[in-house]
Image (cartoon, rainbow, N blue to C red):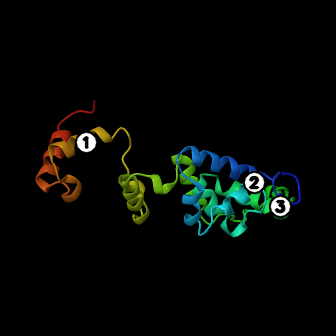
């Protein structure tokens, strides 16, 4: 049936990408019936029709679909646009300006670096990210790898230092101990 009037989008990149991604999701135990409601669809067949090329991927939902099935958002959005205007990809690729295709460009970059959706990060990772975003000078608070053992030692010797800080007497002891010692 593919290549007929019933499946006009079967040979498009968007249909192939979605079909492959759905296959992977199903191998992970995530059915179309689970995906459909997450995307606001009452029927799973809508996703099936998009994947087999019977209907185009709606541009307005392309990034949501991409996130749900684990596809790169920008790439899938362009592929969905390509279904409507075959030269869209060429025009967008040649554009010298950033059209801001994804309002979450930085979030997309973080997901790429993490190798998984931001929602899949641990609670601790999310908390650290929140602290970095809130602090106007986060680099001042960030520890280098070389500093980690010293801070770990402080935390072990003075439980509660993370919440309460060091007492002035402890700071004075550290300053005295390190001041009277020559650099290693």
Q: Which mark is residue 52?
A: 2
Question: Could you say which is closer to the camera, residue 96 or residue 56?
Answer: 56
Q: Residues within 10 Å of mark 2 (few under 14, many from 20)?
A: many
Real-space Cα separation, disc 2 to disc 3, in angstroms: 21 Å
Real-space Cα separation, disc 1 to disc 2, in angstroms: 54 Å
Residue denoted by label 3: 88
SS at circle 3: helix
Q: Residues within 10 Å of mark 3 (few under 14, many from 20)?
A: some
Rendering coords of residue 173 (x, y %): 13, 46
Q: Which mark is residue 152?
A: 1
Q: Are marks 1 and 2 in contact (CB under 8 Å)?
A: no
Q: Which mark is residue 44?
A: none
SS at circle 2: helix
Rendered image quadrant of residue 106: bottom right
Q: Are marks 1 and 3 in contact (CB under 8 Å)?
A: no
Rendering coords of residue 140 (x, y %): 38, 55
Question: Could you say which is closer to the camera, residue 82 or residue 12?
Answer: 12
Judge from the rendering whether residue 142 lies leftward or rightward of residue 12; answer left or right: left
Q: Are marks 2 and 3 in contact (CB under 8 Å)?
A: no
Residue that sits furthest to the front in the current view = 1
Rendering coords of residue 20 (x, y %): 68, 46
Q: Residues within 10 Å of mark 1 (few under 14, many from 20)?
A: few
Question: Could you say which is closer to the camera, residue 62 or residue 171?
Answer: 62
Real-space Cα separation, disc 1 to disc 3, in angstroms: 53 Å
Q: Earlier in the sequence, mark 1 or mark 2?
A: 2
Q: Earlier in the sequence, mark 2 or mark 3?
A: 2
Residue that sits furthest to the top in the current view = 184
């Amino acid at each position: 049936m593919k290549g007929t009037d019933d499946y006009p989008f079967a040979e498009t990149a968007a249909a192939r990408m979605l079909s492959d991604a759905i296959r992977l999701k199903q191998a992970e135990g995530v059915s179309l019936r689970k995906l459909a409601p997450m995307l606001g669809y009452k029927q799973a067949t809508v996703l099936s029709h998009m994947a087999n090329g019977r209907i185009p991927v709606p541009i307005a939902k392309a990034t949501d679909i991409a996130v749900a099935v684990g596809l790169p958002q920008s790439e899938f959005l362009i592929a969905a646009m390509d279904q409507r205007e075959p030269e869209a990809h060429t025009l967008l690729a040649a554009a010298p300006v950033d059209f801001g295709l994804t309002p979450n460009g930085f979030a997309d970059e973080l997901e790429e670096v993490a190798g998984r959706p931001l929602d899949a990060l641990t609670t601790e990772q999310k908390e650290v990210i929140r602290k970095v975003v809130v602090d106007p000078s986060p680099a001042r608070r960030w520890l280098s790898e070389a500093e980690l053992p010293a801070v770990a030692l402080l935390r072990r010797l003075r439980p509660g230092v993370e919440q309460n800080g060091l007492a002035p007497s402890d700071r004075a002891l550290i300053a005295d101990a390190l001041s009277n010692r020559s650099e290693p």
